[in-house]
Image: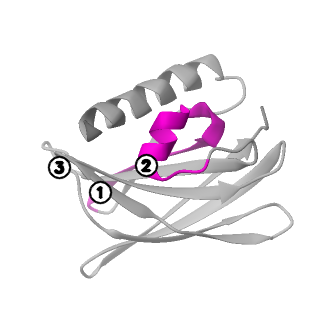
Amino acid sequence: MKKIVSILFFALAGITFSAHSEKMQGAQYKELGPWQVHYIAFPSTFVQPQIAKAYGLERSGYKGIVNISILKNNADATAQTATLKGTARNLLGNKQTLDFKEVIEGDSIYYLAQVDFTNEEILRFEVEIQQANQFQKLQFQQKFYVD
């Protein structure tokens, strides 16, 4: 059942991103050391209520979701577990700590966190990724809109 919820979650996100492409960028990735790190941030209202409930996410016009997955940077692109710590800062420097939840479903592993925002607010994300003695830093920004 969780695998179906996961598929629905990402299918919904993909449909929503293509429909709102003028308002936000879709999923992206960066190659960081031995990893390919995929990341996306979007308003929580893009997620259907039953999916949000299944993942323990709060739906609100002023709350976003950050989704990060880490893949081994090789031909297999194997999903990786890691420890993530992060912050989001607005342009005034106000900081929020990101509390990532690990979600494992079959061969998929991803990390979800929520963040507060106001309309047309740009948030700059900085996420430290650690696996054993390997450390990398992911940085990106996202502009959020209230629906």
Q: Amino acid at mark 2?
A: Tyr
Q: Amino acid at mark 3?
A: Thr
Identify which residue is drawn at 34% across, 34% down: 5
> Along the horizontal axis of the image, is 53 left or right of 110?
right
> Along the horizontal axis of the image, is 88 left or right of 93?
left
Please provide percent x and percent y for residue 124.
Answer: 68, 59
Q: Is residue 42 magenta?
A: yes
* Mark 1 to mark 2 CA distance (whole Å): 25 Å
Q: Work out which residue is located at the far bottom of the displayed protein and give it.
A: 133
Between circles 1 and 2, the one closer to the viewer is 2
Magenta residues, start to end: 34-58
- Above or below — where is 5 with respect to 12? below
Quarter of the image with the N terminus in it: top left
**Which residue position holds label 1?**
35
| Residue 9 seen anywhere in this rendered image of the structure | yes
**Which residue position holds label 2?**
55
Classify mark 1: helix, strand or loop: strand
Q: Quadrant of residue 136?
A: bottom left
Q: Residues within 10 Å of mark 2 (few under 14, many from 20)?
A: some
Q: Amino acid at mark 1?
A: Trp
Q: Residues within 10 Å of mark 1 (few under 14, many from 20)?
A: many
Quarter of the image with the C terminus in it: top right
The circle on residue 78 is 3
Which one is earlier in the sequence, the residue at label 1 or at label 2? Answer: 1
Classify mark 3: helix, strand or loop: loop
Please provide percent x and percent y for residue 64.
Answer: 64, 48
Q: Is residue 124 magenta?
A: no
* Mark 2 to mark 3 CA distance (whole Å): 23 Å
Classify mark 2: helix, strand or loop: helix
> Along the horizontal axis of the image, is 123 left or right of 94?
left
Identify which residue is drawn at 47% across, 49% down: 67
